[in-house]
Amino acid sequence: MGSRSAAGWRRRVGTARRTVLAALICGAVVLPLAGAARPETPAPTPSVSAAPTADTLDEAYAVHRADAAEASRMAAAHGDRRRAAADRAMADPSRHLLAFDGRGAGQATEVLGELTRADRVAVLVPGSDTGLDTYGRFRAAALALHARLTADAPEGTRTAVVAWLGYETPGTVSTAVATTGRADRAAPKLRALLDVLRGITGPTARFSLLCHSYGSVVCARAAEGADVADIALVGSPGTGADSASGLRTGARIWAARGADDWVGHVPHLSADLFGTTVGFGPDPVSPGFGARVFAAGDGGHSDYFAPGSVSLRNLARITLGDTPEVTR
């Protein structure tokens, strides 16, 4: 390629890069403004208590269900029937809540399975647009994983799934979704959760982080020092790190993307704009990143935990430590 052609190519690449990032910033700033003035549904301040232990776990579940029930009453009185119904479902006696906060978009941590006896524990970390109003779809993913683990676990191996909506997720169209800010604030909370879970399960349980979309950025920020054996990134826009080794963890790093996932068309770039780093860098499924890439089938961005899917089967194998059976 001649110098003139090379220079032209570099200009076109640079222009395209700036256009993509400018469009991202512009859309993220302008589009959310219409919803910015939405009045907030009232909810009680979450109960504060000591970290639960195996002996106090049922009591902790009851305390947070009571918070959810009160949040439902307050939402109903406010006229927010959708939130009232979501909170009421969380307050059902069958639900095992390690945390609940009905304020704002809402946060919750739910346990599926018998945590105190679990040998293998999967912690699910959701991506953008996840809150109490949309919690049902996140819980469906956790239920599907728990069912798969129960079916696939060797005899005598006990499993649990923890659905962790423990941070303020960004909107898909927002400034926050293109930066690590929310993830940076969430990471210490995720590490703290892992410490609490370890205190409940004891030292022999094996933990895996299964991280979807923007949740993979959260897991990447929390990876250093996290007490987990495996970290799986699915539908990831990037992690903010240049490579798997850049996550500074002894955990095995896995990555997958479905053939029909739109995130595959997102430019894996990172640039400093207006004093903020926008974008998350290299693609985790690219050979240069260094993750263990596994098969996710033909699914789209919301299909990684679909019952019967290739990706769900592989995520269960990763959680169970059955790594030779993970398909690539």
Image (cartoon, grey):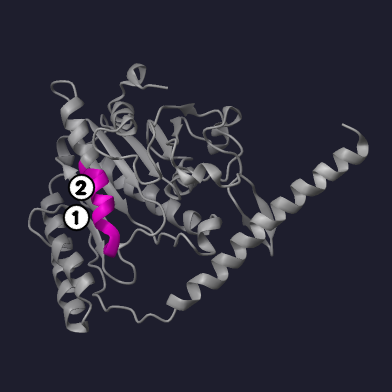
Q: In this rendering, does residue 107 appear at all?
A: no
The one nearer the camera, 263 or 147, is 263
Q: In which quadrant will I find the C terminus?
A: top left
- For mark 2, give the secondary structure: strand
- Residue 152 or 155: which is nearer the viewer? 152
Q: Residues within 10 Å of mark 1 (few under 14, many from 20)?
A: many
Residue beneath the point at 34% across and 42% down: 303
Q: Is residue 137 magenta?
A: yes
User: Quarter of the image holding residue 104?
Assistant: bottom left
Residue contact between numbered discs 1 and 2, judged by CB atoms under 8 Å: yes
As drawn, 127 above or below 101: above
Among numbered discs 1 and 2, the one appearing first in the sequence = 1
Q: For mark 2, does the 10 Å Cα neighbourhood hold few (<14), some (14 to 19), or many (20 or more) residues?
A: many
Magenta region: 132-143
Chief secondary structure of the magenta portion: helix
Vertical order, 228 against 42 (above or below)? above
* Picture coordinates of residue 253, whole percent (x, y): 46, 31
Look at label 1 and name its amino acid.
Leu
Residue 233 found in image quarter? top left
Q: Would residue 160 appear left or right of 62 to someone viewing this image?
A: right
Instruction: Give the SS element for disc 1.
Output: strand
Q: Quadrant of the N terminus?
A: top right
User: What residue does disc 2 label?
Assistant: 111
Please state the horizontal and vertical placement of residue 78, each as a whole percent of the image: 22, 83
Of residues 201 and 163, the one drawn nearer to the viewer in this rendering: 163
Q: Which residue is mark 1?
A: 97
At horizontal 31% and vertical 24% (from top left) the residue drawn is 321
Residue type indicated by callout 2: Val
Q: Would residue 99 be seen by someone viewing this image from the given angle? A: yes
